[in-house]
């Protein structure tokens, strides 16, 4: 199931939850609690119960309260119950994604996605992280690395809106287009 981080309603809920967690000094705990619920969300039977319009709201409220009580912080439990009461539970994954973006921004963190045609050593990954940290103005970089032999060499790096593609596959494609022209 793909999330839509730009969903406006989901963003509003995420901001409200983030501001509440921030005021209480529990952003990290709320994030972990959201991840716990998201792990359950990935189970089809849980998601079907959570999002089904056929399950009466009182049954759903009681079921979610029983399932989550003591397993997640009260802020997360109360938030999930508000989503159910307002009929917004299908937006849960979008809200979690938007919450994570707010948390990352507040904590000066950015995610970089690296696809490499040849394996990177740990030292090379650290060099990439350091270069991206400098390029991002000193943000902490969370590196998501994926070795993709089909790229034939080089790397494709995405950091926010920035995309750098030095893969041999892309270079060969450009060369083929230039030869045809």
Image: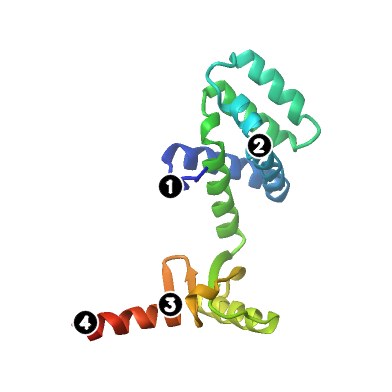
- Disc 4 packing (10 Å; few <14; some 14–19; many ≥20): few
Q: Which residue is mark 1?
A: 6
Question: Which of 125 and 82 lies nearest the eye of the viewer?
Answer: 125
Question: Which of 65 and 108 lies nearest the eye of the viewer?
Answer: 65
For the residues bearing labels 4 and 3, Cβ distance under 8 angstroms: no
Q: Is residue 72 left or right of residue 93?
A: right
- Disc 3 packing (10 Å; few <14; some 14–19; many ≥20): some
> Which residue shows up at 75% across the image and 27% down it?
67
> What element does badge 2 sit on?
loop
Q: Is residue 154 left or right of residue 73?
A: left
Q: Which residue is mark 3?
A: 165
Compare marks 1 and 4 and give the one earlier in the sequence.
1
Of badges 1 and 4, the one in the foreground is 4
Q: Which residue is mark 2?
A: 43
- Rounded to the nearest angstrom, the CA distance separating label 2 from label 4 is 50 Å
**Farthest right residue?**
70
Q: Which residue is mark 4?
A: 180
> What element does badge 4 sit on?
helix
Q: Position of residue 171 (x, y in %)?
A: 38, 83
Of badges 2 and 1, the one in the foreground is 2
Of badges 4 and 3, the one in the foreground is 4
Q: Is residue 7 left or right of residue 104?
A: left
Q: Position of residue 75 (x, y in %)?
A: 69, 36
- Rounded to the nearest angstrom, the CA distance separating label 2 from label 3 is 36 Å
């Amino acid at each position: 199931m793909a999330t839509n981080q730009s969903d406006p309603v989901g963003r509003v809920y995420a901001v409200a939850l983030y501001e509440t967690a921030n005021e209480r000094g529990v952003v990290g705990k709320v994030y972990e609690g959201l991840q716990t619920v998201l792990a359950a969300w990935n189970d089809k039977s849980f998601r079907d119960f959570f999002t089904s319009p056929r399950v009466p709201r009182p049954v759903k409220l009681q079921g979610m309260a029983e399932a989550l009580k003591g397993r997640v912080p009260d802020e997360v439990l109360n938030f999930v119950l508000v989503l159910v009461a307002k009929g917004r539970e299908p937006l849960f994954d979008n809200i979690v994604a938007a919450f994570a973006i707010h948390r990352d921004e507040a904590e000066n963190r950015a995610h970089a996605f690296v696809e490499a045609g040849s394996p990177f050593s740990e030292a090379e990954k650290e060099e990439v992280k350091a270069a991206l940290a400098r390029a991002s103005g000193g943000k902490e970089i969370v590196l998501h690395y994926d070795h993709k032999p089909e790229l034939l060499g080089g790397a494709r790096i995405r950091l926010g809106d920035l995309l750098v593609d030095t893969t041999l596959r892309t270079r060969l494609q450009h060369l083929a287009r230039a030869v045809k022209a």
